Image (spheres, rainbow, N blue to C red):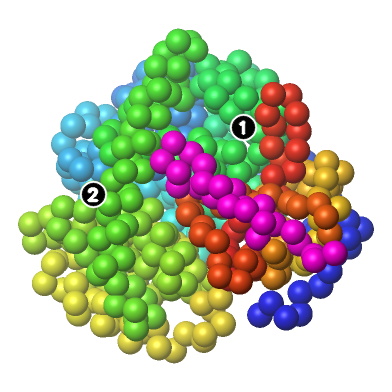
Amino acid sequence: MLSNIPHLNKSDLFALLAQRFDKEDKKLSQIPNPQLLHDADKAAKKIAQAIRANKRITLVGDYDVDGVSSTAIVVEFFKQIPYPLEAIIPNRFTDGYGVNPTVLQRVDADLVITVDNGISAIEAADICKQRGIDLIITDHHTPGDVLPDAYAIVDPKLPACNYPFKEICGAQVAWLLLGLVKKELALSIDMKQFLDILAIAIIADIMPLVNINRTLVKEGLRLLMHSNRPASVIIRDFLNKSNITSEDIAFNIAPRINSAGRLEDASIALDFYTAPDTHTAYKQFELLGQLNTLRKETEAQTTQEALNAVNKNDRIIVVAGENWHEGVVGIVAARLVDKFGSPAIVLSIKDEEAKGSARSIGDVNIYELIKENEHLLTKFGGHKMAAGLGLHVKDTAAFREALNRSAQNIPDDDFIPKEQISGILNSEDIDTELLTLLEQFEPYGEANLRPTFLIKDAEVVSIKLMGADKSHSRIEVRQFPHQRETIELIAFRRVYEMPENKKITCSYSVTKNEFNGRVSAQLLVNKIF
C-alpha cells in the first residue's frame, strides 16, 4: 500500500488538487430552483395559507446538529415575518426520535412541519390525519418502501424528486423551502443571513463538500467571520482565528452543539443559536462546553467497554451493553470503525429494548445492510454512512449473525477507507506558501478530503507528551538521514512511545496554526503504520 507513493512538490500538489474540480465553484445564484424539490411548492403554499389564516403552527426538529440548525433557521425566519411558531425538539431520552406519537401528545396545532426527520413517521402521520392536523415533512434521509400519509413530503431522496443534487442535509431542505415561503408571502427577508447556521449543519452532517454544498459552506464560513448573530460572535471569539475553516467547525463547534441533545436536551443548543444577545449566547455556549466535557468522559468509558465486547472475526461489528449512554453510542461506533476498519453498530440496552447507532466505512452501505434485515428490527432509518435502529434485546445475536451473512457478498475493496495518501513532501516544502496553496481548495470535508502526506521511516529524535492529562504526543523527526533540520508532528489523543528502531512511518495533514499572531504550518498525524 505504501510502496507506490509519489514524491510531490508544490506544483504537483496544486495540479493534483485542481483535478478534483472540473468546473469553477457554483455561485449562490446557480443553486437549483427549490421548486424542483418534490412537493415543495405545495408545502410552501400551505404554510403561507396557514400564516394568512392565523393558524397554529408547530415545528418538530431533531436533536443532532443538523436538526437543531434546521430548527434554528425556521425559528429565526418566523421571528422576522413576524409570526408565532411553537418549536419542539424531541428529547432523545423521554420522547424518542422525530415526530412520533409521544411528541404529538403535547402538540395542539393546525399545521405540523418537520425538519430533518419524518420520512419514516408512518404512525405519527396517521395520528395527524385522525386529528385533522396538516403534516408537512421535510427530511433528507432515505425513504422506506412505505411513505407516511402526509399533506406534503419534501425530501430530495424521494424517487419522484427531480432536484438535481440529492446530497443535501435537513437544514438545506428547510432553507430551500423557506425561500419559497418568502416568495409566496412576498417577504423581504434576506435568505443569505442564515448561511452561517447552514454551513455548520452541512459540515456537521458530513455532506459531500462539492457542488452547491461547497458554495454554501464557503459563503457560510465567510458570513461567520462578520455576522452580528450573537451565536456567531461567540463562535468567532472562541475560535480566535483570522480564518475559520470547515475543520474548526467539525472538530470544535459541532461536537459542542451536538452534546446538548446527546446528554441532556437539544433546547440548550437551540437557545444558543437563537440567543437575542451575546451575554445569553455566551452562557449557553459555556453550558454546551461543560456538556461536551462530560460527553468525552462518558464516551471514553463506553468505548473501552465496547472494545472488550468486539468479535474481531466479524465483518460488521455489533456490540451491546447495559446502561451504555444512548447519547454517545454513535461516537463510540465511529471509534470502533477507526480501530477495526469495519462498519460498527453500538447498542444501548434498557429493559428489553436495544437502541443504537451504526457507522460505516469506505463504500459499504450500512443502511442497505440494515434494511435487508429489518424483519429483526422495531425501527431504523438513516443513510449510506450512518443509521439509527432499535430492536428487542432477544434478537441482537440473530441480528448480528444475519448482518454478517449479508456482508459476506461485499467486495473487500469496499471496506477500504476513503483516505488516500497524496504523496511524500520534502520538509523544505512545508511552509506558509504551502498553507496558502492548501487554502485555495478549502473547504475540506467529505468528498473533498484535506490532502494527506506520507512520512516514511523517518528518524524519531524526541517525543514529548502534551496536554493536562498528557494524552497527546509531540514527535520530533528527521525525515531524511542527510538533513540537519527536524520537523514536528502532533498526534492528538495518542500516547506514542519511542519505537525500538527509532523510526516512524505515518500519514499526516498540514493545517494552519495561529498563536500570538504568528502563523505556522502544523503537521497532524492521521495514522501511524
Q: Is residue 470 magenta?
A: yes
Q: Quadrant of the C terminus?
A: bottom right
Circle on res. 267: none
**Residue 511, placed above or below residue 360:** above
Residue 121 screen position, x and y as percent = 29, 52
Extreme residue in the right direction: 11
Residue 347 vs residue 147: left or right? left
**On the image, numbered disc 2 is attached to which residue?**
325
Q: Residue at x 19, y 72 (%)?
A: 396
**Amino acid type at mark 1:** Leu
Q: Amino acid at mark 2?
A: His
Q: Residue 2's x, y, as percent?
A: 69, 77
Residue 515 is at least partly visible in this image: yes
Residue 6 placement: quadrant:
bottom right
Taking the view exactly as shown, the residue that stands out farthest to the bottom is 409
Residue 468: x and y in percent read: 44, 36
Report the residue marked by disc 1. Answer: 195
Q: Is residue 28 left or right of residue 151?
A: right
Of residues 242 and 157, which is closer to you in this image?
242
Callout 2 secondary element: loop
Overall secondary structure of the magenta section: strand
Along the viewing direction, whichever of 457 and 405 lies nearer the viewer: 457
Q: Alpha-carbon distance for marks 1 and 2?
A: 33 Å
Residue 206 falls inside the magenta stretch: no
Instruction: Identify which residue is drawn at 69% across, 49% down.
Output: 488
Give coordinates of residue 59: x percent, y percent.
35, 33
* Residues drawn in magenta: 460-482
